[in-house]
Image (cartoon, rainbow, N blue to C red):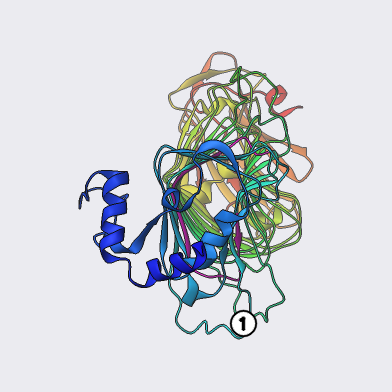
Amino acid sequence: MRQHIMKKYVKAGAAILVSAIAVCACSKDANNPQFPQTVGQYIVVTDYGIKNDGTEIGSELNLLVRDAYGSTLYFPAGTYNLSEPIRTPYNYKKNVNLVFDKNAHITTSKPLDALLMIGFTEISSSVDVGLREFSYVEGGHFDASNAKRGVWVNGCKQLVSLRDMSIYYCSGRHIEISRQGDLPVTSTSCDTKIENISIQGKSSNEDNYGIYIDAGCADCKISDTFVYGTKCALYTNTAGHLINNFHILSWRVGDGVEGDFSGTEGIHIAKQGFFEFNEVYFDTIEKDFVIEGDIDVEMIVDKCITHSYKTSFGKAFLTTTGNGSLQAKISSCIFNLESKAKNFKVFDLMNPGVIYSDSSNNITFSDNVVRFPEKMWPYDLSLMMKFDRTNSEAAFSKPREIDSSGAVIGMLAPSAFPNELQIMHGDGTCTYLTVTAGGTVLKNESDVSNSPVSVNVVIKGGYKILVISAFPSTVLFPEIRNLGGHSSFMSTPSKDRLWTLSDYEL
């Protein structure tokens, strides 16, 4: 009987809906985003026996969803204690949108697969996907303490929109997007949109994910989202995502900064393809970006920040674990290394040859700000002259006194091209240095005989470390000039101090 009444309600609805909404919300406010312009599109779940007082809810909620195909369910403030996940249909013509009051709390005392499962009923290959419409879920606080997932999206269902939600305390995946159902793969694009979501895990010391995107779920859009207290904020096994204004923070509930947070990752990429990351804030993460395995990745990284509130924490900005190709455009970022671990790496690459042999500028590092650069690993390839788009640079920020013990003025990284340098000493003399692509020093000559200044080459691995030395109390202001066009010269991390061979682990 109740289902019969429900069907009549969905079809006719006008006067009854206005009355029901008025009871719940007092009045329709056109400026209130919780309500649409047409109130007749809303069905208030508590008017149909759904309890919001913390009492356990049975199958009646999913029966209501089934009877509300093509409509929107509204959940007033209160606590919804689920005994089974809320399941919405895959079929686009039967979309059920869900709107939760800003003070609606969804929870469970049972070990559920998820609190909310979108696109898990009415799964059929006969569904016409030629005309797709967004399926909306907005609002609410999802306490996933006892669930494997907070929100689970079937990636076969395109154009799902999650917004203005809080999901927390999940020990698994707060949001998971993965393909479900035996459906033919006509497209790997799922186009899920995640907007203004707050995700809080119990602890960054435990294995849990903020957002987990599985294979075949490409082209997701994530914006204005905050993930904290997870081991990995975003894991993706699919490419094509656009990420904008994304804050990632290591944390532990109860005591905040306690714990070593080792192994924390901001964004983990496990599938080749292209990505765009704009305004991502990595806050106290051991490794900001991790690219897994032998995959080819193209990425734009713009206006991002890496920072740590824990002392001596944070190892790398971009880490690769395989030998795939890399195209990365990193620009206008802030690297605040004040509290980072010593020898922080911008590029922690399994195959540094992607930079050594890059003659096409596939990897660029431009217009970035590095605070406390002395914390950087002196062998970091972000220090290469070519990234500064210049053919000359000073070794020091001001003239400095050099003696016979010498000071490091930079080095040459391994290169697929020969290096030809002119090193202006700053006393009117200079040294010409030529190194072959294979690393052989062909020439190391001063332009004058019996010069009081010399440049020595110290070899470590494939690197040629350049040490300038002089008679005691000689003041020099060296400048390195690239004469060959394909220099692999790398400056010291900071020009505000003198660097010695011990800084280079020699």
User: Is residue 229 a member of the stretch shown in magenta?
Assistant: no
Q: Pinpoint residue 41: horizontal percent, then vertical percent.
A: 33, 63
Give 371 or 463, whichever is nearer the viewer.
371
Q: Which residues are magenta?
A: 152-170
User: Which secondary structure class fits the magenta region best?
Assistant: strand
Q: Indicate yes or no whether the magenta region holds residue 165.
A: yes
Residue 452 visible in the displayed image: no
Q: Residue at x 61, y 82 (%)?
A: 186
Secondary structure beneath label 1: loop
The residue positioned farthest toward the top in the image shown: 473
Which of the two residues, 436 or 226, is positioned nearer the viewer here?
Answer: 226
The answer to whether residue 8 is above or below residue 79 is below
Whether residue 86 is visible here, answered yes or no, is yes
The x and y percentages for residue 346 are 60, 41
Give left or right: position of 16 versus 267: left
The image quadrant of residue 489 is top right
Q: Looking at the figure, which quarter contains the C terminus? A: top right
Q: Position of residue 165 (x, y in %)?
A: 46, 45
Query: Which amino acid type is shown beneath numbered disc 1?
Result: Thr
Q: Residues within 10 Å of mark 1 (few under 14, many from 20)?
A: few
Query: Where does label 1 land, which residue?
Result: 186
Answer left or right for 395 relative to 462: left
What is the residue that sits farthest to the right in this orientation? 461
Q: Is residue 191 above or below residue 487?
A: below
Count how many numbered circles sit on residues in the image.
1
In front of the other: 473 or 246? 246
Q: x%, y% of residue 501?
A: 70, 25
Q: Residue at x 58, y 55 (%)?
A: 60
